[in-house]
Amino acid sequence: MRRILLVAAALAIPAAGLSLAMTSGPASAASGPKGKTTCTSVAGTASGTVTISGCTDANGANTGGGSEPVSTAALATGGTVTWLSGKTSTFGAATLVSTSAKHCPGYVKNAGTNPSADKFAGAVTASTAGFKIPGKYSGEVCISQSGNITSPKPLKVS
C-alpha cells in the first residue's frame, strides 16, 4: 500500500511540479512547442493532494508558476494537471526508482524509521501549456512516515 502511495505521490509531483505544456493537436519536434519548466517544490500528502509550485517557465511554457491541487491517487496511473495559468497537461504513468532518502526532511542516519525517497520519470502525453508532445517529466520525492510529500530536487518538464 505504501508503494502505491509513493507511486501516486511521485506521479502527482511530476504532474504538479512538472510544468508540462503543449498545444492541442499533433506537432512535429521540429516545428511544435518546445516549452520547459523547472519547479522548486512538490508538496502534499500521499493519501490526499499534491501542489506544484515555484515553476519557472521557458521557451513558451505557460504554467502560471505552479499547479492547482492534484489528487495523488488520480495520478498513480497518469492524470491531468491544471496549472495556475488555466492550461492543462496530461502525464503518463511514472516509472519509479527507489533512491537514498538522506536529503529528505526527517532523515536520521541509522534510525529505525526514516522517510523514503523515489526518483520518477514519465511522458507528457498532452498539453495546452506549450510543452513538446510527446514530452517528458522527471523529479524526486520524499515521503515521510506520516505520508507527507516533499521534493528534495526540482521537478523538470520538457
Image (spheres, rainbow, N blue to C red):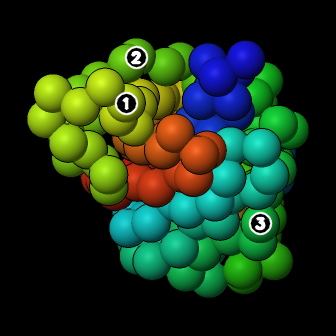
Pinpoint residue 21: horizontal percent, then vertical percent. 64, 57
The span from disc 1 to disc 2 (Cα, nearest Å) is: 20 Å
Rendered view: 150 above or below 129: above
Mark 3 residue type: Pro
Disc ID at residue 97: 2
Say if residue 58 shows up in the picture: yes
Identified by mark 1, the residue type is Thr
Crowdedness of circle 1 by 10 Å Cα count: few (<14), some, many (20+)? few
Q: Where in the figure is residue 68, as x and y percent of width and height?
A: 76, 71
Check disc 2: other Cα within 10 Å, few if <14, some if 14-19, many if 20+.
few
Q: Give the mark, 1 or 3, whose residue is nearer the N terminus.
A: 3
* Number of marks present in the image shown: 3
* Residue in the picture at 68% in, 43% down: 46
Task: Say which residue label 1 marks.
Answer: 113
Compared to 59, does 6 lie above or below?
above
* Pick the front one: 118 or 66: 118
Which residue is nearer to you in this view: 68 or 103? Answer: 103
Q: Could you tell me which residue is drawn at 53 percent across and 18 percent down?
A: 95
- Position in image of residue 117 (x %, y %): 38, 32
- Please give the name of the residue rendered at 77% of the width and 66% of the height, measured from the top-left corner: 69
The structure residue drawn at horizontal position 82% and vertical position 37%, both measured from the top left corner, is: 73
How far across and down, in percent of the image, does residue 66 sit? Answer: 60, 74
Q: Give the SS element for disc 3.
A: loop
Q: Nearer the viewer, mark 1 or mark 2?
A: 1
Q: Which residue is mark 3?
A: 69
